[in-house]
Image: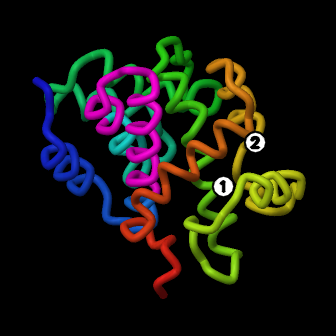
Amino acid sequence: MIPTRAEAEALWRSHNDDEALWRHALSVEATMRRFALAAGADADEWGLVGLVHDLDYGRYPAEHCVRVRSILETAGWPESWIRAVQSHGWGLCCDVQPLTPMEKTLYAIDELTGFISACALVRPSRSVNDLEVKSVKKKWKTAAFAAGVNREVIEKGAGMLGVELDYLIAETILAMRDVSAEIGLDGAA
């Protein structure tokens, strides 16, 4: 079964009610879509994988990236999509190594979208729309800023993709601008 966007959202909402986690899901979805288009891949497939990547986190944080398998299998999701969702937790909460371009991209940008959100929220504009790579890189060097974000995972992901960190940051910012209103980072308070 190939799920629709509406089905994916309904599944996500049946397992989560945290609006901050929903905004993160939307950020990851938009970023996955952007990278899929650049790779000539299926943007819907990559986007839906991004949307549900934290599906099990709300109810099962101790089993994150593990419990999601049974949830998605029960919902009839394709095996390759399930594996991609699990792989974003490689080395953190599961042992499914990212191998495909979709998996490597999800691994690289998951933590990065959170870091970029944090960077946008401390700007006077509280917006991703005027955020630049140099501002993100400046915060990157401050270990206490967004201390929960694993910068090594992001750097490792960029390496797996064969792209420079600046490029990964720039493209993620652009993707998040596309959904800035939906993720609350458009400066409209």
Extreme residue toward the top, this view: 99
Q: Nearer the viewer, residue 120 or 77?
A: 120
- Tell me the residue that label 1 is attached to: 115
**In the image: residue 7, left or right of residue 136:** left
- Tell me the residue that label 2 is attached to: 151
State the image coordinates of residue 59 (x, y, percent, origin top left): 37, 52
**In the image: residue 8, left or right of residue 37:** left
**Magenta-highlighted stretch: main secondary structure?**
helix
Q: Is residue 26 magenta?
A: yes
Report helix, strand or loop for mark 1.
helix
Q: Amino acid at mark 1?
A: Phe
Range covered by the magenta-colored residues: 24-48
Q: Does 12 sit above or below residue 126?
A: above
State the image coordinates of residue 118 (x, y, percent, origin top left): 65, 64
Report helix, strand or loop for mark 2.
helix
State the image coordinates of residue 58 (x, y, percent, origin top left): 40, 54
State the image coordinates of residue 156 (x, y, percent, origin top left): 72, 26
* Number of marks in the rendered image: 2
Q: Is residue 152 magenta?
A: no
